[in-house]
Image (cartoon, rainbow, N blue to C red):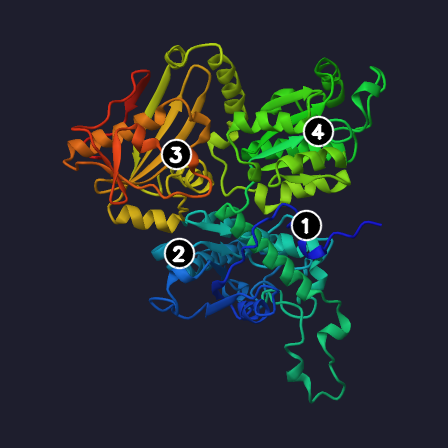
Amino acid sequence: MPPLIDPHSLRTPQDLAVTPTHPQCLLIVGSCLAGDWTRRMKGLPNPCDSDIYLIGRALPAQPDRAIAEYDFQLVQLGLRFVLPDASFSRLNHTDITGHEKLFAHAVNSMQAMLDDAMRWNREHGILTFVFPFVTPLQNPVGRLMPRYDLRNPVYFVEKLNESLAGRVQDYANAHFFDFNEVLASFGKIYAQEDAYTALNHGGFLGNWDHKFDQNRLEPAGRATDFFPTRVPMVFQATWQELVAMWRSIRQIDMVKLVVFDLDDTLWRGVTAEIGDGQLPTTEGWPKGLWEALGFLKRRGVLLAIISKNDEDRVRHVWRDIFGRQLKLEDFAILRINWRPKPDNMAEILQHVNLLPRNVVYIDDNPVERAAILAAYPEIRVLGGTPLTWRRVLLWSAETQVPAITAESAARTDMVRAQVTRETQRQAMSRADFLASLNVRMQFFRIGTIEDPSFPRVLELINKTNQFNTTGTRWTRADCQAALAAGQAVYAFDVADTYTEYGLVGVLVVEGACIRQFVMSCRVMGLGVEAAAVAQVGQILHRNGNWPVQAVIIETERNLPCRDVYQRCGFVLQAGLWQCALAGPPAIPAHIALDERLTQAAE
């Protein structure tokens, strides 16, 4: 019998995790409930240190440690600070206006308290997760009362959390952490205390008040004598959820491509054995998996197929099996043939310019999985029961993204166009091919982290491995500090005859030095990297910053960009690449550049 899924990691699968990275130190701003976190984190398998500051007291100018020493900050606001004791229960049930005024008071108090608690986030940009208020177990007014009504304390707190979540979006590098979802997944009855204490206390079920009841004629007993508790399980699950969010934001072990087999993998049965009137049963895990693929594609994860099959037969039965739920066009690349699967995987990796470590392969056949692993040990594979695949693909930190950009959502179409472009290239000389592409490039400057393009800039810097001249990862706080210090962040987007690639390149410039150059692998081979260097050179030359210098730090994975400056006329001197030309490099003739920089922006 297969082992049961560990309930602690039910919501946060570990199947795709490779790098054993864990937070080392947290900054906590919260109510007395937050104090319990400090104690419990010391008992984790990977203990995490923390400093705690209580709500209601003025925060010091700086925490005990430098902000850079904290992996992230937790903010947990106490409900009792915004919903005074008995304020709800003393209202007349017919006093609708009174309930509306109480809600307005709670919202205003919440916003003021949040603004105080987020001081270090505002000043330093520290990554912050904000907890919601804990919703009551049930409506204390009565279970037959209207559900979606402010007179129901459950709905009252839900609406307050909605307002809190909206407010959190006003802060940079801050995320709303839905603790109530975790509680609901593991059972609120095992963790919440409002079965015996006021709903606005919002604490964990425990025996904290037993010490006050020692002189009763009859012993009051301990709460855990009467109420079932799984607080340690809920805490551990909550911690794993926070770590998963942190790993997703840091882009650790990210999955960029998922490759599927077909028979008994994407559907039940074998294509060759499926008659036109004998379609496989699709309810259950197949439909769940198909839906998961839609969400992955929405996040910008690429999908591909490698199947030993007859492609004409697959295309014939596809619509009958999937209907409108899944199209062949949802997959960036198809390799449906009788060739060895590792050979097909080699072609796919070449087309998408991805490393094996960014790929997940799913196949029902253990022999085929072993063949892929033998050829590419870093590819992560899934097999066995299909009942677990949806959960792993959707809920793993490695498939999640901090934000969905326009470029992410359109990634499949871009890669399909890239494959078409590559096919065309093979039939022409390089010069004729480049001239036929009608490459258009827009080059612009990012002046603030509030720029609408900034989320894509940060995503590109932190996800790109191959064309990344230093491999440096940035946080929002790092970017904010760099911009404040006068560094320039330039970006460019690209389009050609086949597709609009969106924002695909970022250059960080300090003085006359290009400190980092990052570019999506999707546009490698178009010559746009040379155009970007030339454009930066022209800007710096106009501003009197000459000669231009550039930095390259070799990493394990950035081989494709190590010669970029050499190709642009730079020479290596004292560890820096320096332009040896009398003026800036020329922009390649086949690229039309639409410069959106004003003189002031330079």
Precedes in sequence: disc 4 or disc 3: 4
436 vs 547: above or below: above
**Lower sequence index among marks 4 and 2:** 2
Q: Which residue is drawn at 17% across and 36% down?
A: 546
Secondary structure under tag 3 reads: helix
Q: Mark 3 points at which residue?
A: 561
Asked which quadrant contains residue 224, the reply is bottom right
| Residue under label 2 | 121
Is residue 480 something that shows in the picture? yes
Between label 3 and label 2, give the one nearer the viewer: 3
Q: Are marks 2 and 1 in contact (CB under 8 Å)?
A: no
The residue pinned by badge 4 equals: 261
Between the C-alphas of marks 1 and 3, the distance is: 63 Å
Give the mark, 4 or 1, whose residue is nearer the N terminus: 1
Along the viewing direction, whichever of 189 and 324 lies nearer the viewer: 324
The amino acid type of the residue labelled 4 equals Asp
Q: Distance between the residues labelled 4 and 1?
A: 50 Å
At label 1, the amino acid type is: Pro
Q: How crowded is mark 4: few (under 14 residues within 10 Å), some or many (20 or more)?
A: many
Q: What element carries label 1?
A: loop
Callout 3, which amino acid?
Cys
Q: Mark 1 points at which residue?
A: 146
Task: Tell me how far mark 2 sits from mark 1, CA to CA.
Answer: 39 Å
Q: Which residue is drawn at 68% across and 84% down?
A: 213
